[in-house]
Image (cartoon, rainbow, N blue to C red):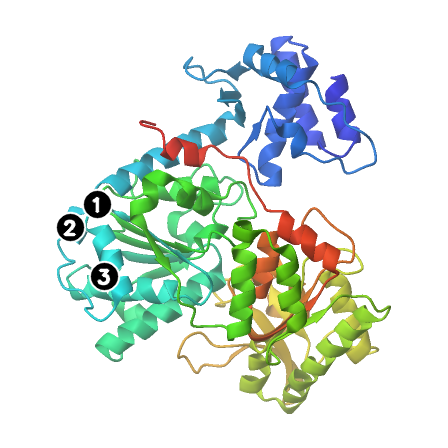
Amino acid sequence: MGLVDDFFEAGVLNNLEVEFARMLERRTNYEDDIALLMSALACRAPRVGDICIDVENIDRTVMPETDRNLAWPPVEERLRAVKSAPFISANDDGKELPLRLEDNRLYLYRYYEDEVRLAQRVLEMASQPSPSIASKLNSVDANNSDVKNACAVLSSSSLAIITGGPGTGKTTLASKLIAQFIENGVDPQEIWAVAPTGRASARLGETLGIELRSKYGSVNLGDANIKVATIHSAFGIHPDSPFKARFNEENEAPVRVLAMDEASMVDLVTMTRVFEALPKDCVVLLLGDPDQLASVEAGSVLRDLCNAMSLKSVRVTLGKVHRFQEDIGELADRVHNIDKDENFAGVVSLLRQGGHDSVHYDDCSSSDWLDRVVDLAVQNYKEVIGHALDGNISKATLVPSKFRLLSALRKGKYGCEALNAMIKEKVFAGRQEWFPGRVIMVVANDPVKGLFNGDVGVAIRIDGKIKVAFPSYGSSAIQRLFDPSFLPDFEDAFATTIHKAQGSEADEVMLVFPPEDSPILSREILYTGITRAKRRLWVFARQDVLFQCLQRTTRRASGLAKKLDMPCV
């Protein structure tokens, strides 16, 4: 266990992963240090977002968290060790051991099994249409080419992967398709609209409600009996036991049309539970942007699906952006397409040029740049404070959708926690915990109250008392007011992480990057931050940090795309 202990002391492995290796050693009396190290690293993989490890190249992707140098065994020794270990099953030996080796990829067996199951189910759905749904696609919106393209996909497949950047109309297209299905006889009770977070599912419901009202007048989702929910609540997946669900192969979900928004945020285990619970005749609409940040948990499923050549025919790619100012859209495109020209300097040059007051760049060269960030944020939040003091609920709750301060980090001097503290000190120093203008974000779902992870609220003074107000959903004019003591878990949200902002937007956005490089910085985090802004964007980042972001892409170890492109799975 010498190697395992070395990697633990270097901060690569945690206690659980070390104990996993020790358990393998105890149960098999096999003391190969290299095999035990590779097994511990495979156990670590899901914790860092990977499905497996690439035994041949693992030394290029694992970085120590201390100054301690890692003594990596030679590649040939690593491959020999994993092929010989008694607790690792080889490619086709049929054994169900704790770990599985496939083409130099080493998995925990459960993750390997889920990857195989998901690939099989996806290929089944992509290869044949839903007979009952395909027969209802005769009448399409003749004026909408995107609807036509999606219907053409669904005429030969039960799966349509609808991708595009923010503001390209993915949820609008899905809503038009669902309205089309209803018009052609699909029972609304068998239509589910789901997303990984409560706020994202509510937003999908809003768009769907607008489309239904435009077609059928005063129809709302409740009257139509369309299920709008988070993925976990809809399929009965508990976060503490994600490998089991209420709906499964033996107890199929009662759904014939499933629309899943923000699919890039869905991890492998959750996506597998969904697909294995679907009836054979179900149609699936996956909506997302594969270039945004991947799921918090293991896997980058949407990106893997988009990279599979076998699924090229089921993709509907939307390109026209309806959300951004032109200069913000151009900057996002340059970041997105950086692989094609590798022109990192061109992106920074575009930032420096700005554009008609819509793009602003600060290279953090002045000693007071962080104070400038706080001052600009305070200036924007003065508006919400004024409305909160006046008790103007509608205007106060609108301010967070007009301005957002986003940091790449949560912890440290430049993270959102520190920024929140500085803003509160500057504006609210000496006041009680709850004061008019305090901006908070809910971090736990509470369906009974209608509050979901990611909802942003504002503390408001009403009749001399402090209430927390949240913007209403859709066309509802009902004011949502809560006593602070009855809120679900929350945190301050004058500043939030870019990751937390995924799926939201604001008129003006300020992005803050630390002056030193960090492993969390990537092209995806830069792209996601830029595409939160609709009208004006501020970027605070050193040029060398931006270069690091542009060069570093998040590539999670997985075999899903390869399985999808194999002749048989």
Residue 363 lies, in percent from the top left, at 75, 66
Q: Are marks 2 and 1 in contact (CB under 8 Å)?
A: yes
Q: Residue furthest right?
A: 367
Give x and y (percent) for residue 520. Answer: 67, 49
* Residue where numbered disc 3 is placed: 148
In the shown orientation, is residue 107 left or right of residue 494? Answer: left
Q: Nearer the viewer, residue 552 or 37?
A: 552
Residue 491 visible: no
Disc 2 marks a residue whose amino acid type is: Ser
Residue drawn 68% across and 70% down? 352
> Which numbered tag is attached to residue 132?
2
3D distance between C-alphas at marks 2 and 1: 7 Å
Q: Name the one closer to the observer, 544 or 557.
A: 544
Q: Secondary structure at mark 1?
A: loop
Please identify, in this view, whether the residue under mark 3 or under mark 2 is nearer the observer.
Answer: 3
Secondary element under disc 2, as helix, strand or loop, is helix
Residue 519's spot in the image, x, y percent?
70, 46
Name the residue: 59% across, 51% down. Answer: 342
Name above or below for residue 384 compared with residue 181: below
* Residue drawn at the location 54% of the way across and 35% of the way down: 557
